[in-house]
Amino acid sequence: MERIPILRMGEFLLVTIQVDMHDQLALQLQDDLTRAIEKKGAKGVLVDISSLEMVDSFIGRMIADISGMARILDAKTVLVGMQPAVAITLVELGLSLPGVATALNVERGMKLLRQALHESNSDADFIKR
Amino acid sequence: MQISSSGELPLATEHDIVLARQAVRRMSQQQGFSLVDQTKMVTAASELARNTLIYGGGGNLKWSLINDGIKRGLRLTFEDQGPGIPNLELAMTDGWSSGTGLGLGLTGTRRLVNEFEIDSTVGVGTRVVITRWK
């Protein structure tokens, strides 16, 4: 069966969506990713959509749901690489993805995840003391 | 207004939505739309194709490349023989949703195109026509 690959990079997971997803594939990704967060104990998820030429309300909702599910599983999601034309269309459609952290590219997204992880680690240190 | 070419695509499976998006992308490029306009038209088509499949139980997409003087455009008609929309006025209210969507479907789609027409009869079906000009 067709699947979007999920790569592990240390404490983070990296998902690069490179195909025009049909709805079932988007739902499969949601399922696979939540399982992967649990299994690998991932603290962060980077979703790269730089190859996506279109995000409609279904895919937009899938992204927002992934971010929400990951948060409940104690992982932070950062969406990176959205093309400007996609951003313009998405906002005009009425979907501004509230609650979804974004970064311009993978590099900045990784930086954001590392910062978030660092902050939560120093909070934990503080509590231990 | 003249029609330079036209055709029809089925909307019977989820994969047909993907094929419809790809066809609309090609046609938008052919009509010389900017990248933003292409993206808007493809996104609008994706929303309506999904409505046709999920709420209408499947149907078809009729497309035509049109021109009006020097203006070029793309017109898409989504038709189904589904249950129809009982309260069209309500369905066209921002934020309204029958439950499975985000409540952006029809009103959101209307904002992505230049012309938007909807006809729906309970027990007969629904037809949505959208047009975007270059």
Image (cartoon, coloured by chain):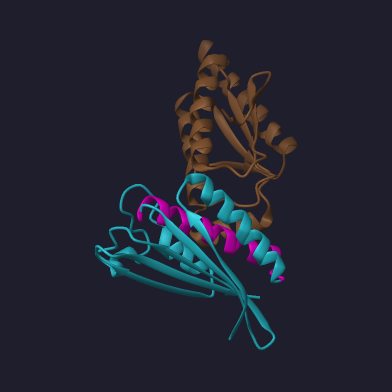
Q: Which percent across, then down, holds residue B61?
A: 49, 62
Left or right placement of residue A108 versus residue A98 in this view: right
Pick the front one: A113 or B96: B96
Q: Nearer the viewer, residue B3 or B120?
A: B3
Residue drawn at (33%, 55%) of the image:
B97
Along the horizontal axis of the image, is A91 left or right of A103? left
Looking at the figure, which quarter contains the C terminus of chain A?
A: top right
Q: Residue at x 58, y 51 (%)?
A: B19
> In the image as oriented, which residue stretches furthest toward the right?
A107
Residue at the (25%, 65%) spot, across then down: B122
Q: Give the quarter of the image for residue B6.
A: bottom right
Q: Which residue extends farthest top?
A: A129
| Chain drawn cyan in the picture | B
Chain A: colour as depicted? brown
Magenta residues (range):
B32-56
Q: How many marks?
A: 0
Question: Is A49 above or below relative to A116?
Answer: below
Q: Find out whether residue B41 is within the magenta segment.
A: yes
In the image, is residue B55 above or below residue B67? above
